[in-house]
Image (spheres, helix red, strand yellow):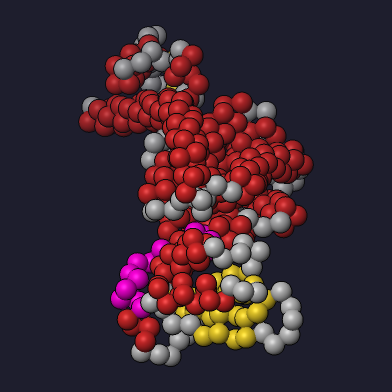
Amino acid sequence: MRLVQVFVPRDELDLVIETAEEAGVDYTVSRDTDRGEFEALVSIPVPPPAVEPLLEALRAAGLDERSYTVVTAAETIVSKRTDELTGRFSGTRISREELRARAADLAPAASTYFGLLIVSTTIATAGLLLDSAATIIGAMVVAPLMGPALAASVGVIVDDESLATRGIALQVIGLAAAVLTAAVMGWALRGTVLLPPGFDITTVPQIRERITPDFLALFLALGSGVAAVISLTRNVGSVLVGVAIAVALVPPAATAGLGIAWGDPPVVLTAGTLVLINMLSINLTALLLLWLSGYRPERTESVERVYGRLRSRVAVLLVAIVILSVVLGGITYGTYRTATVEHDVKTELETMNEAELAAGSELQFRETAIDYELIDVYTGGRPTVTVHVDRPPGEGLPDDFADDVRDRLESAAGVDLEVIVELATTLRSG
């Protein structure tokens, strides 16, 4: 339930009472005995779906806009009269005014926002370098990224340009700050005793997950946008939804920053693409769901203009997402190709081991290293496969042994390979 309290200006009490009676809601009047600007306070308990129609009726009746109308959440109301009201005003949607206020509250002051975001990014960067999923998730609890995304979308829908601009600015500058924070942290840690010599960020599973994304990554961003709107309009689960949004944005932003620190353009490109497509997807789903939920500007004459602006923004977001999806699709395909080659090579080496064992040979293909990166798929780079072969003392091998190994591996993988065969004589004590 909500308690709507109207500070009634002089000579407008009858207007407010008539509006409440026409709406069929209960009310009480507390008259002001001094000679101030307001003559009375009218308190009206209503269900959440009734707030917006009541406020619209008061505006339509001509209530002075300089008056105060306060909407507060009533935690408990003891009365059987609420059953009738709840039955008349069914639904769970909050009013447009509450929506705007909540969105504004979720976008904190700049100092608070950037302070929490830098702390969150620092923790997330440490989690990435440590390959610790728990640390990364813990950092997401701190990240305040849900508010700006919702503020931008709500501002567009209710025609509050300052709220929309603030939400967009906080998102863009905030993610840039996250990338910069991770880059500075990575630069400071690189080459120190905290990281092993020759540390390669692309070998860390948590980082590799962010630089080899596929289309399934879109589901997190799209789902987060939908969940954020539901959370905002129904005031439930905002903390958990905020974590989901942060997971979609902060770790890939931190990964892009680490790519800058390590001077690795492919890492910056892939992680940066993931950040942008997630941010755009969250904003797109929030915009569409808010409009489909029935939210409109306060003034009727503004609806057409806001609808045109909404279509323009949705079109821009869709075009940007499609373009970035092409990049994401290329990453998906490249990742699939590199993984396929690696799998086929390893499978063929296992088959070769089994064949040697069946033939009574002690020759063994023991280890492999495959150098085939995402960029090689599109630049035509040949995969380099290093095969470690154990052989007993005195066992000779044909001169074209390396060529035979290469031919078999190329046949299995379906691509041209550069194969390096390392021979090792194995001595075993009985």
- Asked if residue 251 shows in the view, the reply is no
Residue located 48% across and 19% down the image: 376
On the image, the x and y values in percent for residue 145 come to 59, 52
**Looking at this view, is 285 or 350 the one in front?**
285
As drawn, the residue found furthest toward the top would be 399
Residue located 49% across and 41% down the image: 306
Q: Which residues are magenta?
A: 85-99
- Left or right: residue 11 compared with residue 49: right
Instruction: Verify whether residue 86 appears in magenta.
Output: yes
| Quarter residue 382 falls in | top left
On the image, the x and y values in percent for residue 262 come to 67, 32
- Left or right: residue 339 compared with residue 157: left
**Looking at this view, is 110 or 23 the one in front?**
23
**Looking at this view, is 367 or 329 the one in front?**
329
Q: Count numbered badges in the picture.
A: 0
- Left or right: residue 88 compared with residue 141: left
**Looking at this view, is 40 or 156 the one in front?**
40
